[in-house]
């Protein structure tokens, strides 16, 4: 199992009036990846931003762009996210009729492919996909909004995904998204996660607090390695 822990701030919790500045600030404050929550108001009951905003942000940081697509008709938009500068794309099986095809398209466009499991989506969903993904995302809240509480029952799913990843022998990241704080970070890492998405817990307190916030999550996460 990988033992390096990555922190991916979700800019959904940033101040959209000064998004570029916020992304630069989390970059220099210790973010490993930039997590981009794309929402279309159909797949989830919220609308965020799309490829043109991402393309503008590409100019302000060289950190990995980790796009989490919560949109319908996902296949149609994949080339645009590539063009906008995303290195990684994660999609939900429920967002289109052919998840296998979507993951194949992401890889064929030269991006790393991730599959996301909602809190109610069974872990077995990845059994026929694991040979084609670079990342499995376990959602520890229902997608759509930042600031929700961590759903404890997902810890068992994280353990089940970790055991499948280890059995696969492939180099696959295990990401957790939703309600990550210093308190929950240790638990998800102990269960097998190695990439932690955090919105509220990173962006609270404004730019001067980002470095302290990221360090608090990272330090807590490392205690979960045991
Ligand atoms: C929810 C998003 C998350 C969310 C995390 O649909 O995928 O990335 O913004 O926010 P917090 O860390 O506030 O739970
Ligand atoms: Zn997300």
Image (spheres, helix red, strand yellow):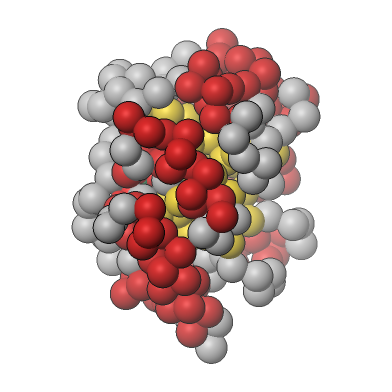
Relative to 225, residue 125 above or below: above
Location of residue 130 in the rendering, given as x and y in whole percent from the top left corner: 66, 47
96 vs 143, nearest the viewer: 143
- 144 left or right, relative to 215: left
Relative to 161, residue 219 above or below: below
Q: Quadrant of residue 144?
A: top left
Location of residue 188 in the rendering, given as x and y in whole percent from the top left corner: 43, 69
Q: Residue at x 49, y 42 (%)?
A: 23
Relative to 2, residue 110 above or below: above
Number of dots carrying numbers: 0
Location of residue 88 in the rendering, given as x and y in whole percent from the top left corner: 63, 38
Location of residue 152 in the rendering, given as x and y in whole percent from the top left corner: 28, 66
Relative to 185, residue 67 above or below: above
- 88 left or right, relative to 39: right
Q: Residue at x 30, y 19 (%)?
A: 42
Q: Quadrant of residue 161?
A: bottom right
Q: Residue at x 65, y 70 (%)?
A: 4
Q: Is residue 145 visible?
A: yes
71 vs 29, nearest the viewer: 29
Q: Residue at x 57, y 40 (%)?
A: 66
Quadrant in which the N terminus is drawn: bottom right
Q: Is residue 92 visible?
A: no
214 vs 146, nearest the viewer: 214
């Amino acid at each position: 199992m990988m033992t390096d822990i990555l922190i991916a701030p979700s800019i959904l919790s940033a101040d959209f009036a000064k998004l570029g500045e916020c992304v630069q600030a989390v970059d220099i404050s210790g973010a490993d990846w930039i997590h981009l929550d794309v929402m279309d108001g159909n797949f989830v009951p919220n609308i965020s931003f799309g490829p043109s905003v991402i393309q503008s942000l590409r100019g302000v940081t060289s950190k990995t762009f980790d796009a989490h697509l919560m949109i319908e008709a996902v296949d149609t938009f994949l080339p645009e996210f590539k063009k906008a500068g995303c290195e990684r794309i994660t999609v939900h099986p429920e967002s289109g009729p052919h998840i296998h095809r979507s993951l194949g398209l992401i890889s064929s466009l030269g991006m790393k492919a991730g599959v996301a499991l909602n809190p109610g989506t069974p872990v077995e969903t990845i059994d026929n996909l694991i040979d084609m993904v670079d990342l499995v995302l376990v959602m520890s809240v229902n997608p759509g909004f930042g600031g929700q509480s961590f759903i404890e029952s997902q810890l068992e799913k994280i353990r089940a995904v970790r055991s499948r990843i280890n059995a696969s022998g492939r180099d696959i990241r295990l990401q957790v998204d939703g309600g990550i704080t210093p308190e929950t970070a240790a638990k998800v890492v102990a269960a097998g996660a190695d990439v932690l998405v955090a919105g509220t817990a990173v962006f609270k307190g404004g730019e001067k607090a980002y470095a302290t916030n990221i360090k608090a999550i990272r330090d807590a996460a490392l205690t979960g390695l045991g």
